Amino acid sequence: MIPVLFELGPIKIYSFGFMLVVAFYSCFYLLQKDMKRLGYEVQIASDMVFAAALGGIFGSKLYYLIENYERVIDDPMGMIFSGSGLVFLGGLMGGTLGVTLVLRKNNLPWFKFADIVAPLLILGYSIGRIGCFLVGDDYGVPTHLPWGVAFENGLPPSTFRVFDLYYPWVDLTGFEPGLLTVHPTQLYEVAMGLAIFAFLWNRRNHVKVVGSLFFTYLILAGIERFVIEFIRTNDHYLLDMTGSQLISVIMIIIGSTALIRRFSTPTSNT
């Protein structure tokens, strides 16, 4: 993989950080255009993206550390300061909190702006997943499929020993000790995420019920993450689902319930 994109003497540009910057400015550019089109101050777009990025990164890391608490106990400093940890659900919660604070400060309607940023949430996530792929983080379970990828220097490396040590619940039957090829789930999520972004972006100018685009995002993003978890390395808990799947189900339920209520309420179009 390519953990370092550019290196000039002591200066290093890390791929993960670079893709986060790309995600940040891509979302800012599109949000800025929409804010101008809708007649809002451009500075609000800057504040929203900054708050979303800061809250998203903090939330992602916190969720990642909680989900991998056993590895945190073994290597707390390494886990806290590693480049890994772009956890979608933690990032969504942290980013939502950050944006909410900005909206409250400027006395702006939450649901209207939720519709505006909904496509950008999945776009930023998709771009960030490219960074995960480049550093070899958040990959899937071992596979013999021809497009499987071996992360020799991943975080952690995709070796038989790593799976046996950190992911004992993953079935290694049929795999030999050594470096393993795994599902490049990061790329799967990039493809699915960009497809969701394209759908939501094309729908943003046709929102008839305020909040409906955001709740549609919750449903689609929840389905995407629920499906991908079947080939991720996360442990299974309640009802044989991973923690991410459980939260994804909650997202889908909230999105579906809210859509039904808002479309069935006569005042929902105001």
Image (spheres, rainbow, N blue to C red):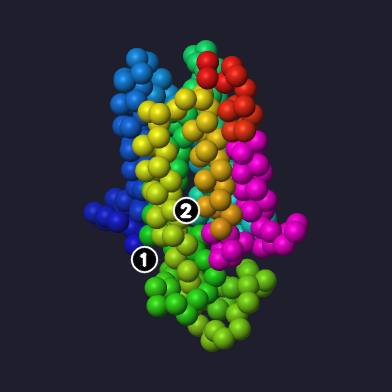
- Give the image location of residue 82, x and y in percent: 50, 54
Amino acid at dot 1: Met
Q: Which residue has dot 1 on it?
A: 1
Q: Which residue has dot 2 on it?
A: 83
- Residue 109 lies, with reference to residue 122, above or below; the image says above
Residue found farthest to the right: 238
What's the residue at 56%, 66% (across, down)? 231
What's the residue at 47%, 29% (across, down)? 115
Can residue 80 be seen here? The reply is no
Q: The magenta stretch spans which residues?
A: 228-257
Amino acid at dot 2: Gly
- Give the image location of residue 204, x and y in percent: 40, 31
- Please state if 264 lies on the left or on the right of 28 as rendered: right
Q: Earlier in the sequence, mark 1 or mark 2?
A: 1
- Residue 42 lies, with reference to residue 65, above or below; the image says above
Q: Secondary structure at mark 1?
A: loop
Name the quadrant of the N terminus. bottom left
Can residue 207 be seen here? The reply is yes
Pick whichever, 10 or 58, lies toward us.
58
Name the image quarter holding residue 123.
top left
Residue found farthest to the top: 107
Tell me the crowding category of disc 1: few under 14, some 14 to 19, or many 20 or more residues within 10 angstroms, Cα based. Answer: some
C-alpha gap between disc 1 and disc 2 = 14 Å
Residue found farthest to the left: 8
- Give the image location of residue 202, x and y in percent: 36, 37
Predominant SS along the magenta part: helix
